[in-house]
Image (cartoon, rainbow, N blue to C red):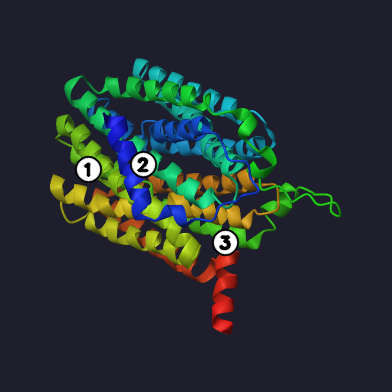
Amino acid sequence: MTAFIITALVNFSERVANANDYPVDVSSPVPSRQSLRALDALTFFLADVQDGLGPYLAIYLVAYCHWEPAHVGVAMAAVVVGTLLAQLPAGAMIDRTRHKRLAVVTAAAVVAACCVIMISAPFFPVIIAAQACIGAAAAVMPPAIAGISLGLVGRARFARRTGRNEAFNHSGNVAAAILAGLAGTYIGYGAIFYLVAFIAVASAMSAMFIRENEIDHARAREAPVVTPEVTPVVESISTALLRNRKLMAFVGAVFLFHFGNAAMLPLVGQKVSAGKPDSAAALMSACIITAQIVMVPVALLSARAAQRWGRKPIFLIGFLVLPIRGMLYTYSTDSVFLVAVQLLDGIGAGIYGVVGVLMVADLARGTGRFNLALGAMVVAAGLGAAASQLLSGVIAGASNYNAAFMSLSGVAVLGCVWFALFVRETNTEHIQGTLSTAAH
């Protein structure tokens, strides 16, 4: 029943967004219904796997293990440090490998094992090591999903497919949050760890239903076009990344986005769990569900809007909601108010998940390094998230949670300025269309 409701929500939102107006790449083979539905299922289940336990771990460590905020910050940062160290190698591997499904299966198995280990031995070194391993496994998932998607549907359908991936991803988070809230409230907090492990196994099974022979691996990496006159050459790593100034400017914006955003929801969990550990899981689930439900239509609408109006103005909207959200968190600890504020997270994250991938695909076109470039974006996100968790943990421990929220809001304002000044529009079709309209 849950799966039916979520699928109906995604399909309805897609119709509202008029997603069928996207151009069709008639030169590309159409993937089978089995592969497309398996990709839907994979993005649905991976939603809660690629982030591990997220804010639920923060609540568990504060309320049940009695960790200090600074130690919790280290544990939350460990997962993004693991992602940081593994992300670029993972992106390069996904560019080269013809076994993308196996990469997803292996990563999901690592996450499942680490969840079981953490609940079995909740000690500082074990938690840190397991979180780092989860982060390393999670590094494989974004480039693998993007590569599989692009390889299956082609560039012309990629915006629509990315929007649909994000819609199922956020729907999966809704389902997982509902189950986690129920498990934490009625069974015990340990059940949440086993729930994430089970979801990881389900994601691995979904990946195996995608037909590997339908994935065009050259298209999946944005390889140069083959012509009789030109021998395609894949750009070197230094050229594709470090010498690509437009990409580096965008990566800097992604860093600031996650620096301002990543620690906000875990901070909410820590703030409300002090003195109310029994109700924290239910409140956290309500916050996540509210945001994720908003993200479904936002993701689909963002995909279409980014095609019509360009990537930059849509992404800027996602940036602008961050400082507003951070400041609102300081006004009250009322549960209804906090859940309402999470609507803004649905807007920001829904836009980032779609438009960020599209901008990287634009910037990596013809380089053969799409998944590596996407890995660079995720590295920037990981660095920003690690900095966010560490800074907020230190400030919350030295002062209070409201001071941490205000600090994150200041970083978000800096990110808005950076993006507005230094990041250019990447959709060349939109730029050419605008120039053509102006000329007439």
Q: Point out residue 430 in the picture as x, y percentages from the top left corner.
A: 55, 67
- Residue at image mark 1: 271
Residue at far top of view: 120
Residue visible at 81% across and 52% down in the picture: 227
Quadrant where the C terminus sits is bottom right
Give amino acid for label 3: Ala
Give amino acid for label 2: His
Please name whichever residue, 234 or 88, is drawn nearer the observer in this view of the structure: 234
Q: Point out residue 224 in the picture as x, y percentages from the top left corner.
A: 74, 50
Secondary structure at numbered mark 1:
helix
Name the mark nearer the viewer: 1 or 2. Answer: 2
Displayed quadrant of residue 55 = top left
Q: Is 202 left, or right, of 250 in this rendering?
A: left
Secondary structure at numbered mark 3:
helix
- Residue at image mark 2: 170
Residue visible at 34% across and 54% down in the picture: 16
Mark 1 or mark 2, earlier in chain: 2
Q: Is residue 431 above or below residue 119?
A: below
**Res. 334 visible in picture:** no
Give amino acid for label 1: Lys
Name the mark nearer the viewer: 3 or 2. Answer: 2
Classify mark 2: residues with Cα within 10 Å, few (<14), some (14-19) or many (20+). many
Residue at far bottom of view: 440
Q: Is 27 left, or right, of 427 in this rendering?
A: right
- Residue at image mark 3: 249
Mark 3 or mark 1, earlier in chain: 3
**CA separation in Å, label 3 and label 2:** 27 Å
Quadrant where the N terminus sits is top left
Please name whichever residue, 187 or 8, is drawn nearer the observer in this view of the structure: 8
Residue visible at 69% across and 36% down in the picture: 96
